[in-house]
Amino acid sequence: MSTEAIAAGVGVPEGELAIAQRVRQLQSLIEQARQVSVSGVALDSPTTAVAATSSSQAPVGDFAAALQAATTVDSASPTTAQSESAAGAGAVSSEYDSVIEQAAERYGVDPAVLHGLIQQESGFDPSAQSSAGASGVTQLMPGTAASLGVANPLNPTESIEGGARYLGQLMAQFGGNTADALAAYNAGPGAVQQFGGIPPYAETESYVSKVLGYAEAYRQAQPASTTVGGPA
């Protein structure tokens, strides 16, 4: 059917005429946008250049191509919401949150800190195993696991229970100082005692900083009533 017939509305069913008129309106808008992009917009950035190039190359009647060009421009620049989401990536929730809460309460530790510890130790992977021999979500060494009554460190509930118990013991040993307790969890209580605090090991210093950062992000994302205590 010719464009002249569509324009005049001759012999065109009413439904098809409405669709055809809408298509022409869209084509007109695309043409206007193309003209502005080519002649009236300074190409100050790669994103703008992509928009102008895509618009100028797309045929006037090719609405799909124009739509694709717009989508490309939108996806090239992260939105504020996307940036904020990336910034808050530390606040990770997991299927073990309720188990963490209960274990933390039993052993008097901050659930946010226990959550951060697990996030740093294993990323909540129950099958995680280190080259040193630690395993499970709380990365317990075999001897430590046995002393804590953990029969199967790869069982997430047992591992969380054991990790919470061990962290509680370290908190008591180091006078409630969360940073020292975390350092002892990573480097061993002997190293913390030797140096009178966090030992000057890059790995341990980074470990304590990351766990506390994850804990704070998690704490900020939870109702205030779900955490007890806090970092010393």
Image (cartoon, rainbow, N blue to C red):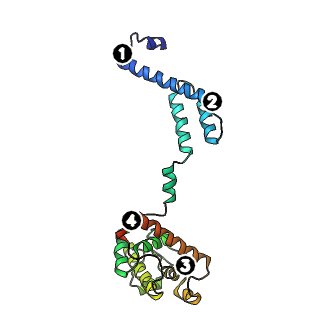
Under circle 3, the secondary element is: loop
The reply, left or right, for residue 162 in relation to residue 90 is left
Distance from label 4 to label 3 (Cα)?
34 Å
The x, y position of residue 20, in whole percent, is 43, 20
The residue to which callout 3 is attached is: 132
- Pointer 1 or 4: first along the chain: 1
Under circle 1, the secondary element is: loop
The residue to which callout 4 is attached is: 222
Question: Which residue type carries mark 4?
Answer: Gln
Q: Residues within 10 Å of mark 1 (few under 14, many from 20)?
A: few
Under circle 4, the secondary element is: loop
Does the image show residue 57?
Answer: no
The reply, left or right, for residue 133 in relation to residue 152 is right
Report the residue at 49% width, 64% height from top.
90
The x, y position of residue 78, in whole percent, is 54, 48
Closer mark to the observer between disc 1 and disc 4: 4
Q: Are marks 2 and 4 in contact (CB under 8 Å)?
A: no
- Pointer 1 or 2: first along the chain: 1
Q: Residues within 10 Å of mark 3 (few under 14, many from 20)?
A: few
- Pointer 2 or 4: first along the chain: 2
The residue to which callout 2 is attached is: 40
- Pointer 3 or 1: first along the chain: 1
Closer mark to the observer between disc 1 and disc 2: 2
Report the residue at 42% width, 77% height from top.
153
The residue to which callout 1 is attached is: 13
Distance from label 3 to label 2 (Cα)?
63 Å
- Counting every numbered tag in the picture gives 4
